[in-house]
Image: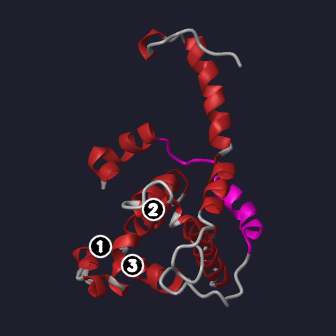
């Protein structure tokens, strides 16, 4: 494979960066394939009655059957995608993957769903089940509550008629077909504080 000549980014030429940009666009276009592979890696015993992949599929199935938007169905499908590489901050990882392809509302819901989900179990482990109340005045608080109620906490049923991953693949590819914002564009548009929120 052809490579650039530089070993320091500041020494790259316009032609080299144009070459790299073409490779980057190809890599971005292949993201759905990597996401599907990441979902398949979640198909392991978890101590729950379903695997993490089955949980994700069940979440997406429930969202699909509730006539949610394609982006919300995909968000439900990928909401725990971070479990593999970021088990202590899985919500943030999933939200970061989704951010360029979904609305700010969907991004916010997925970013905070781990905290909101604690409502169902934290008190059993000595935690604060109402920790989500720190966002009580946020415009999407109720939406995050609804997401966890309808598409997360109830998605551990081995007898539920869950749709298979192949069903969701075209929806995933559609949602991930074109990123709306790159990191630099996002920061320029919304400011550094919003980008970190």
Q: Which residues are magenta?
A: 164-182
The residue that disc 1 covers is: 138
Which of the two discs, 1 and 2, sits closer to the camera? 2
Labels 1 & 2 near each other (Cβ < 8 A): no
10 Å crowding of disc 1: few (<14), some (14-19), many (20+):
few
Q: Which residue is mark 3?
A: 117
Quarter residue 77 falls in: bottom right
Percent from the top left, x then y, of residue 118?
Answer: 34, 79
Residue lying at 28% horizontally and 77% vertically, measured from the top left: 132
Residue 76 placement (x, y as % from top left): 56, 71
| Label 2 close to label 3 by CB (< 8 Å) | no
Judging by the rendered image, the residue that carries numbered circle 2 is 107
The residue lying at 34 percent from left, 49 percent from top is 195
- Quadrant where the image shows the N terminus: top right
Q: In which quadrant of the rendered image does the C terminus lie? A: bottom left
* Eye-nearest disc, 2 or 3: 3
Position of 111 relative to 146 (above/below) = above
Q: x, y percentage for residue 91?
A: 42, 63
């Amino acid at each position: 494979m052809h490579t650039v000549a530089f070993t320091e980014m500041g020494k790259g030429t316009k032609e080299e960066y144009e070459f790299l940009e073409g490779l980057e666009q190809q890599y971005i276009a292949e993201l759905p394939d990597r996401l599907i592979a990441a979902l398949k890696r979640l198909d392991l015993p978890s101590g729950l009655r379903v695997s993490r992949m089955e949980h994700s599929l069940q979440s997406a199935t429930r969202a699909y059957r509730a006539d949610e938007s394609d982006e919300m169905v995909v968000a439900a499908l990928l909401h725990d995608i971070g479990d593999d590489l970021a088990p202590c901050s899985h919500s943030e990882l999933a939200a970061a993957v989704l951010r360029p392809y979904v609305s700010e509302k969907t991004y916010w819901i997925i970013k905070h769903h781990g905290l909101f989900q604690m409502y169902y179990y934290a008190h059993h482990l000595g935690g604060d089940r109402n920790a989500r109340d720190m966002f009580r005045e946020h415009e999407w608080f109720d939406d995050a509550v609804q997401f966890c109620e309808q598409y997360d906490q109830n998605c551990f049923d081995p007898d539920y008629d869950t749709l298979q991953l192949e069903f969701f693949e075209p929806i995933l590819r559609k949602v991930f077909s074109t990123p709306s914002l790159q990191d630099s564009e996002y920061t320029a548009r919304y400011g550094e504080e919003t980008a970190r929120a």
